[in-house]
Image: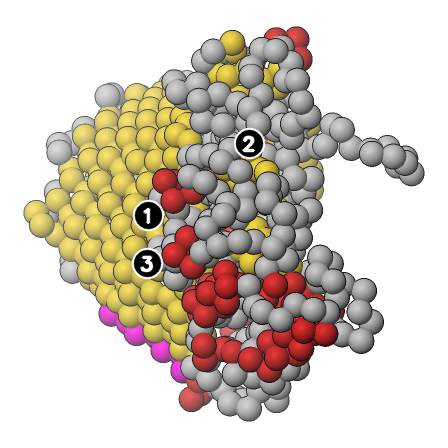
Amino acid sequence: MMKRLVLAILAVLPLVFAANAQTFRGAINGTVMDPSGAVVPNAQVKAKEKSTGIDHSTLTTTDGQFSFQDIAIGMYSVTVTATGFPALTIDNVLVTQGAIYTLPVKLTLSQQATTVEVSAAALALDTTTETQTTSIGGSDLAVMPLNGRDFSQLIAATPGYGGYSAGGYGSLNGTRANQVNWQIDGVDNNDLWHNIPAVNQGGVSGIAGIVLPLDAVDQFTVQTQSAPESGRNPGGTVDLALKSGGNTIHGSAYAFFRNEAFAAASPFVTNKGENRNYNYGFSVGGPILKDRLFYFLTFEKQRFTIGLPGLATEPSAAYQTLATNLMAAHGVTTVNPVSAALLANLWPSYALTGAAVKNNYSSPDPEFGYSYNGLGRIDYKINDRNQLSFHYFSGEGNQEAPVGGSALSEAASELKFYYEIAPIHVSNYSLILNTVISSRLSNEMLAGVNYFRQTFSDANNTFVVSQYGLLLSPNFDATGLKGAPNIQISGFDGVGQTPPEGREDITGHLTDVLSYSVGKHQFRFGGEYRRAQLEEFYHRHGLGNIKFDGSVGPWKADATASSEVKSLADFLAGDFNPNTSTIALGNPTRLVYVKTFDLFFQDAWQVSHKLTFNYGVRWDYEGPLGNSKKDLSVFIPSKGGLVFQGAGIDHVYPPRYKNFSPRLGVAYKPKENGDLVVRAGFGIYFDTPNLNPFLDNRPANGAPNGIEGNPAGSSPVDTVGPTAAPPWVANQAVFPAGGAICTTGNGCGSVFNIFSVSQDFRNAYNYNYNLNVEKGLGRSLLVQVGYVGSAAHHLLTTQDINQAALNSTGT
């Protein structure tokens, strides 16, 4: 495996160091000169995509420059004709995603042939932009060893990337791991909840819940240090270019199998257990109408089983005997009927047969998951001036696995009832129209939607504990929530690990970009609008957290009993710890919207044949989250305490309208016909904040989860302790019907835990800068050495504003 990885990385290096340009498509530019080096104006330049036969045409400017912007990636043939010169055809011009292929053209005076044909270099030296681009495609992409065929792992091949974990979660050039903009053919692929990829997002245990078939990916591109056209996040933009059909039918069929029969046995377990992963699928593309209408289809199914045994300590019959003996020794002769009913129903009987020893249970139940994933694409040449492209991806799946553990600072459970299940549905689609308005002017318009929905719960989420005599609160059954409460008996496996949780995240995306070439300038200007709708329903602690730790019953000081036996005795007696048991009352479900908008202008100015100067500016508006329901509150003392967005304040934090991002860059060739270029750039890059810090922050000090969780308004949420003293009694409520309410505008007469957002909150931004040198080594290899830096400002943080001072005393 290591040898394959090294070979794959070496194969990718020529592409990794090809620093290029701008969008999710590609471009060709250059200058046409005569044999003496003088520029040739009004020469006709045609670029023909070889697989589809679709061609593009333009005329050189008065400075001999030409440019084809926003063209489909692929292999091109470029033909130049000018009065007094034989036609020149340059074959095999490779256009890659987000890259400008700079093609210097020198005509000849040969009268021997009607057309002169030459072959382009496999890689072109970028003399136009300062953007740093890593592009992986073709055979390089096919041989990359990717666990689970997950495209997000490809980001690890990007220079400046570090801290890799599942789902491409890591830092680009020192930025935060969730400050990367993910796209598919230019359309949004971000789950705004975490600001991580929606398609291929990790589910339970970090394994991708659904996958975009790798055979649908033509190129994987990462851009950093970008021109004003790129934004949303300071780390960079990751874009997938999808494959398309052509004039010939092409495709693939594949099947990958992993089975424990081919694996060596572990020295730590007695048997290998099931360890299986099946991936199979196909792709096919071709013409519907030759040179005009093309299709591409792909499908992949994944199914895995991971049978690694998990060890846990369960309250077995043998442990129960020790606990009841301890209870009897202290005068408690009966088991609480509520505890007995819960033990008989919430714990499967097969798990309670072990001895009274640590790790008396080995789970026979494997982790399991599957997904169905399909993609279709249509490309249509309407006429010589207009081309249309449409893609639709959909993936559905489910996963089931144990969750929690020390890494998450949570109790885990090896009982199948309490494996977490995470059904997921993701779709992504877009419609793109490319229009050639004139030989100097072209336009690209994109409309797309990204949809993400995932829910989480225990595998068995049908329990109605009131049927067993446990009444959590007087009106709990009216909430409709089902499932086991999180009952933690210290020293034993817990139950009720995952209350009902999840989110639905929909983002609409519109982009329009206009390109104009004149004289020495290649202008681009346009804008982008995104509207996100997010419904979150995280009933965290909504089923209650009830703890038994051996500190309540009369045996708490008995030194002859072990801590776990005392904890189990507490449970069997119904003696919960009232100081550490809580429940979140109220409905935390919220529907919020976020609107973002940007405008940009940029120019690549060819000062001379040796020097290109890039300059431009971007303006970003990042709208605060909000809705019209007046159920999002923040704490503003000057307004009397808790106030609601839409009633007292317009936004949960003030929007900013001055997020201007200047960008500058240069590309310099010391020798006009040389193969060395020096580039440098600087820019400001603003960040779009993710939403879960505002709505599901999970603070460690017991505060509400977010601005939806404050105890006020029409939908108050409050985390409260028990009103009943232990032991619990059948059909008598452990917790109150509701918490105390903080009436807005009066300063709140009692002590409350409150979550708020600073009214000085502003979007994070980075200063990004780079200096690099690129050298061509022949026609097929480029080597680049550079320095990239970033400095971040106003990063999003949370803090306890009432935190006790260091070494302070008292309460």
2 vs 3, front mark: 2
Q: Identify the residue at horizontal 22%, vertical 39% (top origin).
A: 389
Instruction: Give the dominant element type of the magenta stretch: helix, strand or loop.
Output: strand
Q: Relative to 264, does residue 578 appear above or below in the rendering? A: above
- Taking the image as shown, residue 314 lies to the left or right of residue 386, namely right
Residue at the left extreme of this rendering? 289
Label 2 environment density (alpha carbons within 10 Å; few <14, some 14–19, many ≥20): some
Q: Which residue is mark 1?
A: 426
In magenta, the rendered stretch is 253-259
Along the line of sight, which residue is nearer the eye, 751 or 536? 751
How far apart are labels 1 and 3 at the CA level?
9 Å
Instruction: Tell me which amino acid carries mark 3.
Output: Gly
Q: Position of residue 344 (x, y in %)?
A: 45, 70
Circle 2 or circle 1, nearest the eye: 2
User: Residue 397: which disc?
Assistant: 3
The mark nearer the N terminus, 2 or 1, is: 1
Image location of residue 519, percent across then percent down: 41, 18
The amino acid beneath tag 2 is Gly
Say what secondary structure mark 1 lies in: strand
Q: Reading the chain from its start, which is encountered first: label 2 or label 3?
A: 3
Q: Which mark is residue 739?
A: 2
